[in-house]
Image: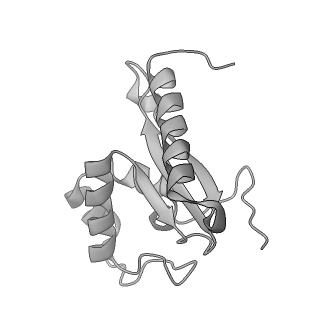
């Protein structure tokens, strides 16, 4: 299965873990305004969120959990977590990052390990640590 995403590639925010994590930083009113007039969201797989009510539900889940999940929405056979990194004292430099697993390898144990590592890196970056 060819799965690629290169530097500079663009994907709809509503289908990716990093995009959903960033969208979840906005409140519902901003999301509704952003998607005003959009009847159907871009669908990259049969699992992609199809409409604004579905996106709002996904954003609520993301806010509650503190991370976003892409369970085959961008690429059917790929599972990903995404979250936002808030740079200390300068929210103009916030960004999101993700970790992806092939769905066939995404056992509950591997998912938990991947999320734990992602959160650990986020926490270190938010604390101002240089990970080089």
Residue in view at x 37 percent, y 18 percent: 89
The picture places residue 20, in percent across and down from the top left corner, at 42, 57
Residue in view at x 49 percent, y 38 percent: 116
Across the whole image, how many numbered discs are drawn on residues?
0
In the picture, measured across the screen, residue 15 lies left or right of residue 59, that is right
Q: Quadrant of the N terminus?
A: bottom right
| Residue 43 or residue 77, whichever sits in front | 77
The picture places residue 37, in percent across and down from the top left corner, at 32, 79
In the picture, measured across the screen, residue 27 lies left or right of residue 55, that is left
Residue in view at x 39 percent, y 29 percent: 91
The picture places residue 127, in percent across and down from the top left corner, at 44, 17
Tell me which corner region of the image, top left, top right, bottom left or bottom right, holds residue 56. bottom left
In the picture, measured across the screen, residue 3 lies left or right of residue 76, that is right
Residue in view at x 69 percent, y 58 percent: 9
Asked whether residue 43 is in view, the answer is yes
Q: Is residue 121 above or below residue 73?
A: above
Q: Is residue 14 above or below residue 94?
A: below
Q: Residue furthest left?
A: 29
| Residue 36 or residue 56, whichever sits in front | 56
Q: Is residue 110 above or below residue 43?
A: above
Tell me which corner region of the image, top left, top right, bottom left or bottom right, holds residue 88. top left
| Residue 99 or residue 22, whichever sits in front | 99
Figure coloring: one colour
């Amino acid at each position: 299965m060819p799965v690629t995403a290169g530097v500079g590639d663009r994907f709809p925010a509503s289908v990716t873990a990093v995009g959903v994590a960033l969208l979840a930083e906005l409140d519902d009113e901003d999301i509704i305004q952003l998607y005003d007039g959009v009847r159907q969201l871009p669908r990259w797989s049969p699992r992609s969120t199809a409409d604004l009510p579905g996106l709002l539900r996904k954003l609520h889940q993301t806010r509650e959990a503190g991370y976003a999940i892409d369970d085959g929405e961008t690429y059917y056979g790929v599972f990903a977590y995404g979250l936002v990194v808030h740079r200390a004292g300068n929210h103009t430099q916030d960004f999101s990052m993700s970790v992806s697993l092939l769905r066939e390898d995404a056992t509950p144990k591997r998912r938990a390990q991947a999320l734990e590592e992602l959160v650990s890196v986020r926490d270190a970056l938010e604390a101002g640590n240089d990970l080089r």
